[in-house]
Image (cartoon, rainbow, N blue to C red):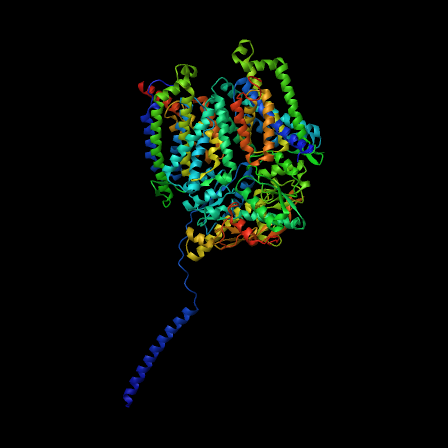
Amino acid sequence: MVRMPGRAFGDDIRVTILLIIIIAIAYPIVYVVSPGWGVVLGHGITWVIALIGFNLLFSYAGLLSFGHALFLGIGAYTVGFMYKYLAVTNIELHLLGSILSSAVIAFIVGFVVVKYTRIFFAIFMLAIAQIFWSLYYKFYWITGGTDGIKVARFSILGVSLENLDFASYHHIYFYLVTGIALVLVYIMWRIVNSPFGLALKAIRDNETRARFIGIDVYKMRLYAFIISAIYASITGALVANHHRLVTPDIAYWTTSGKVVFATLLGGAKVFIGPVLGSFIFHIIESFAMRFIYWQLIMGLLIVIIIIVMPGGFIQLIKTSIERGSRLIRR
Amino acid sequence: MIGVEEILIRSYNIFFGASVLFLIAVGLNIIYGVMKIVNLAHPAFFTLGCYAVAGFGMGIIISIFGSSSITPILIAPPLFAALIVVIASLLIFPLFLFMSGKGDEVQLLLTYGLLLIFEDLFRLIWGSEPLRASQPYELAGSIYIGEYIVPVYNIYVIISALTVALLLWFFLFKTKQGVLIRAASMDIEMTSALGANVRRVLLITVLFAAFLAGLGGGLYIPSGSVMLGMSVELLVLAFVVVVIGGLGSFLGSLIGSFIVSLLRTITLIIFPELELALIYIVAIIILTLKPEGLGGGKKW
Amino acid sequence: MSVKTGRRDFLKGLIGGLVAGGAVGVAGSEIYRSMIAPPPPPVKEEIPTTPLKAGIQAYLTGGGALWGKPMMQGAVLAIEEINEHGGILGRKINYVVKSETGPEETVREYRTMVLDEKIDFYVGLISSSNTPAVGPVAEELQTLTFFVDGCTDFLFEKVVPDPRFCFRITNIQSADGTAAAIGAIKLLNLIEKDKVRIAHIHPDYAYGRNAHAHMQITFEKVLSRDRVEVVYEAFPGLFKVTDFTPYITEIIASKPDILASSLWGADVVNFYKQALGYGLFEKMKFVSCIAHAASPMEAVKDFPDGHIAGVHANYFFLYPEWTRYPINRSFVENYYRKWGTYPDSPSEGAYVAVYMYKNAVERAYEIMGKWPEVDDIIKTLEGMTIYGPAGPVHVRAGKPNKHQCYKDGIVGISKYDPTYGFSILANPITIPISKITVPEGWDGTPDPKAGTLAYSWISQTWREGELPV
């Protein structure tokens, strides 16, 4: 996990924010041309948050979790329960609820799990995520089982969106999530460049030495774990509102695989990677799903990327730019 | 409900389930033990074995031996399946070479990608309906245990798995090749310094694991069916087995498979609702209390 | 009076008379002609000639493919038949096929079909997890949607109680369990027994839980609660279990008289093949509400004889008998010629869906004089009865269960038929659908635990110890 020295554009917050803004501007044009692809962009921006959170854990803290679906599920089901039992549609309360629930559960789970690293951590998270999944699945009279919980349209600042046509509703959703994503991405940037972030990197690079110089490895990891959990949970809450349906699928381990894959696709080693990855992944997924053998395509892509392009798309972009500038210089 | 016959019947089932799980888990452990690779695609080898037999193997076997000679029909399918899977593993061996020595993330992701590829290849080649190959199961018939009828075929599976386990144990602990493999698992660099061809060791390991998984698939399929999505379901079960038994441990494969099968049967009797959750909870408890698993510590 | 005025007067009178007579004559003959002539034809607008587009969504992979493929095949057969005969009012039908999977992805594919493919109508879905997910989206996106199955009562009772665009072709889910239980009671003479021990095994989701609840309440009502004892219940995950042996041994150990089951697709195939080895079928009667409903050639090739065969309360290709009901015969023959297998419940349902659309469009066109708007088609569909291969099917216009279709169900006894090479449904008995489903206009509330109106209706209105049919 060698970091590139200097402020490359992949690690520039301004470039990251610019990317999001460009997509936000392109969105209405895309939607008019093809509403289906507009919805795909909606997926993309929603998952940016979870992937950024995941990458904090993966690239900065050095912990690969194959159970991130756990927290996506918690966010989604928090919204589901809030709607089903409390008839709450306010998006603000949904987000607050999902932040609180994930923080609590992340603290409890992390308390135990963060002691382990590498494969054990990955498998541990997988097992816990599967427990929650199986509970969502089996306790159908609370969770609706595989049918899930249907959620009405959310309301913003108390204003209901029930009577809008689908397009307007989706536009509001998209820009709301873009705003939230921008804020959360910026917050993550500050976290990663704070003393806390530097401590994480130190732990990742050499755990023994970090401990030696007085860093509380366990506590730092736990905080990173909780933060990444909250981010994932927020995405889960947003997905619940985007699809208006909460099913156990979101907590299944294939969702965890999706998180990891999309992050790597964009490029886990740089800050902008997960943002790019979210959009590229959903675009590819949408294409791939049109052909019946989409698992084959996704699998092949994973293999190709890992072998040929471990830095993800960002690496591809970087090398193209380098080659291009070399050509120009001649 | 707790007569001798009831216990016998349930034990029969527990051992059958454990046998199938063992044949999957042991290959997984061997690949990890030697190459430190966590192969998420390993259950796909098992499924490939099932498909090989149900897809075309059984047809070939029956046309050669006829449909009523029991011995060849019992023995040929697992061997056929193992052969096909070994060939497949040879084809993807370069990937294993690439993976060895790389970080965990690389392995997990690469093998996850492989799993997806396998799943869709199954669909591409064999379509989306579940496939069966139940001739051996039906030929073997059923016998009475008291007033209960049980299929004889399952006994055959249990005996085969036990035989495999014994042979494997003998190989790993009593032959030179086996000692070499175990040594390689503890320290690849040292082993190569001692002159063993590490690459060859890796190859043998992969082929071995593939062979066992394929064998398991060929043994299992007459008693059930193979369908899409099976590899994914088996993967999670296999991991629980490996966690409980200990990653990389041969003994652990035996213990883990037995415990998981036992747990499953017990929960089905008492708490059918918790069937899935209980297995994972036990896995976590084991991971917390004894992360090396019940297979007893470090290696093998 | 002088003679001079006489001639002039006469001429005046003659001309006046002629003119008046002529006028009267002409007017009279006009009136006469208009009375006997046909009215002028209504002004008919031109029908567009662009082809229509149908969206089909079905299980193409996994354990549900045994249902999804025939469903798709039934729809495609109907579309091609219609196109061969000139299309609907001259418009051909193009179609696009998408996969049905879990609720989230299915909804996503549905949205793509509507937003990007711009389909005119939709035929699809088998799973009861998917129709409640897609239903609200269909209403939101305002697309005429024919659900072939996904028959959960929840769809029109809870999720979309006042549907405009959604319709559902195959019988409502509660009818499935109820019909099978009644069939079992009649065909196995259960009323004669003092006590009936029942074991249950159902897939763990809406359909399985629904079938379980309704089979159970039917048994309890008709046989009387104190004569019914439940000895074992299990709910394995849908298409998640390949090894049913632990369940099988537990079921056998609990010594039931009947095993009630709504396992379907790959699950029931796995289950019965494994159960054969344990002699389960000799120890109890297997009551399946659905095993014979789809892909009988693959699914029930060596199914044991003498057990209750259910078809999801819908259709088995041999009935209504071909000699008496040519619609069924030609459907079976055409389907077999095109696809090489026999049609089943999902194929019949999808086939009827397409023809229902065609019929409604044509009838609405007759009335409106132009290609009908969606609301005209909907109005025509409501209350309509058409004759499909399974018999007459009626679209309910009012609540509860508005837009649900109803047709009589059949249950029978499984029997291997050498002509076909698989187990067929023999000794069929017809279960009149009106006797086992909530009637139009009933104003009860859904049962809190089982969740359906049918459950409350059965509990409240059926008399204990009596067969309602």
Image location (x, y in percent) of residue C351: 53, 47
Residue B295 found in image quarter: top right
Image location (x, y in percent) of residue C129: 50, 41
Q: Quadrant of the N terminus of chain C?
A: bottom left
Is residue A280 visible to us here? no
Toward the bottom, the furthest residue is C1
Q: Is residue B14 above or below residue C124?
A: above
Residue A98 found in image quarter: top left
> In the image shown, does B157 or A319 lie closer to the viewer?
B157
> In the image shown, does A196 or C56 lie closer to the viewer?
A196
Q: Is residue B264 above or below residue C231?
A: above
> In the image shown, does C423 or B160 lie closer to the viewer?
B160
Is C272 placed left or right of C133 in the picture? right
Picture mark count = 0
Q: Is residue A37 above or below residue B160?
A: below
Is B298 placed left or right of A42 in the picture? right
Q: Is residue A329 above or below residue C26?
A: above
Is residue B34 visible to us here? yes
